[in-house]
Amino acid sequence: MLEIERVTVEFRPKKGPPKVALQDVNLTIRPGEFVVALGASGCGKTTLLNTVAGFLPPTSGQIRLAGAPVLGPGRERGVVFQQHALMPWLSVVGNVEFGLRLQGLPRGERRRIALECLDKVGLSHAADQPVYELSGGMQQRVGVARAIATSPDVMLLDEPLGALDAFTRESVQEILLDIWRDSARMFFFITHDVEEALFLSTRLLIMAPQPGRIVHEFDVPFSRRFAQSHNARAVKAAPEFIEMREHILDLVRHTSSGSVQ
Amino acid sequence: MTPPNTILKTTPDIAVTVAPETPQKTVPPASPTGSRYLGTPGAGTSRTISTVTVALVLALWWSATHFGWIKPLFLPSPELTFKAFVDAIHGNTQGQTPLLNHVLVSLARVFCAFFLAVLTAVPLGIAMGTSRIVRGIFDPLIEFYRPLPPLAYLPLIVIWLGIDEGAKVTLIYLACAAPLAMAAQAGVRGVAIEQINAAYALGGSRWQIITLVILPAALPEILTGMRIAIGFGWTTLVAAEMVAASVGLGQMVLNASNFLRTDIVIMGIIIIGVLAYLFDTLMRQAERRLTPWKGKM
């Protein structure tokens, strides 16, 4: 279980008043949950993910994973970045096994695990290619394979599909849901795309800026529905999906326009 | 007046006229005159143009000396320079040292200093990039001596280290070390924070991140720094061989200038230039081999 308790993050610029990026955020994520944070830019979603990843210490409050406080980055929390952040001097499989290499696993063992993970993202055929020759969608899938290779309890994904075209985006969404369904991991995913948020999440958080905070929370059924039917188009075209999408679009529009005043 | 049908009538039969098809290399279409398409600025190969430039300079050199525009004392002819080269190979110069010895001794000095600089200055630059304390200590020292002309501190080095090989290698070493340290430091600064965070999130230790992420990520900059550093090494060679050297390319040039042997001076300059160019070509190939991702990610 991941517990975020009264987390506040303040940035203190050299000039001017401190900027409150996150205020009093409370959130609990249980195993098997796919939590998506949705909001316009500047609402603190990336800040929240960075504090959970351990890249950024909270100004106040606490984050606990399985009861133990988070005091920095750690391999029980896998991260997929907005810009894939792969190592161009390593091959595809070299990137995926990088985390296992850091742990000191023997070469054959880590290659076996890395190939398994590449298979899950549908890239076994590209194992020995250099990553800088891959398309953006393939690079992002390598990023996902790298994050799951060390079998983390929590997957943190920071707008990983933002730079992809609509078709590639949907296929990577399906890959993510397959990985989620096959494990009891906790997923925390950030996006500004309403449809993506609805399709992936079991719980949807809507965040608002100034100060960054969670303003709405919904339980969402569609990712479980996809896990059963495996038909993304049918799930996304269902009247219920469209209705909820419009409702949430309205909410997001209100929360961001309200904060401007 | 010719009737309008003449041309058609004289055209031979079909079978003869088909031109043989020659395979063509794919060349980007030539832009029409007056076009405003720029494309990538400076795209395309420049090798032919460079060859023409070199040929023109050689031709100018030859004409200037051959038609007596310039006195041979100021600019000896290409033939005289080549003769000086052949003579030097056989050791027919002041000092009687064969040219090969001059070359080998100078190469040894430059490369000895260069490799020492790579072994010490690259780790130092990485340490400066990754540690506030190391940067605080070494930054003012390097920034102070870096812009100094080596000739300015040469006397000090001679007083401190004597007139042996040590002083010469030290002088060249100092010239190479500063750009290497700066390049390595800049390389470290240029590493994307996401790459470092990714490695931390995968459980990497500080040391693992320096050796497995920062060092390879900084490699393109380090290789560029090596090319710049070896250039400084060659530049400093003559200065290093000014004091108490009896052999070496720089010494050969200096000695020849004392006797107004411009032919040997020019020959020596060309040899240093060619050696430096050859090494730079090797380094560029190494760059392509070692950092094929450069500019692609």
Image (cartoon, coloured by chain):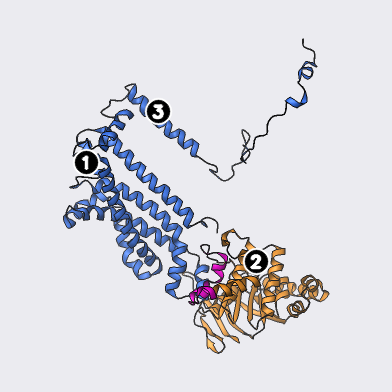
Chain colours: A orange, B blue
Q: Write down the chain letter for disc 3.
A: B
Q: Which residue is more in the foreground, B260 or B181?
A: B260
Q: Which segment did they paint magenta?
A: A87-109
Image quarter hosting the C terminus of chain A: bottom right
Look at the image and tell me in which quarter the N terminus of chain A lies.
bottom right
Give the spatial CA distance, label 3 vs label 1. 31 Å
Q: Residue beneath label 2, please?
A: A162
Label 1 marks a residue whose chain is B
Q: Do callouts 2 and 1 mark residues in contact (Cβ within 8 Å)?
A: no
Q: Left of B96 or right of it: where is B122?
A: right
> Which circle marks residue B97 in the picture?
1
Q: CA distance from mark 2 to mark 3?
A: 60 Å
Residue kind at label 2, given as amino acid type: Gly
**Which amino acid type is marked by label 1?**
Thr
Q: Which of the chains bears the disc numbered 2?
A: A
Residue at 61% across / 34% down in the picture? B34
Looking at the picture, how far across and down is residue B149, in whole percent?
Answer: 28, 50
Nearer to us of marks 2 and 1 is 1
> Sequence order check: which comes first, mark 3 or mark 1?
3
Q: Amino acid at mark 3?
A: Ala
> In the displayed image of the protein, which residue is found farthest to the bottom?
A67
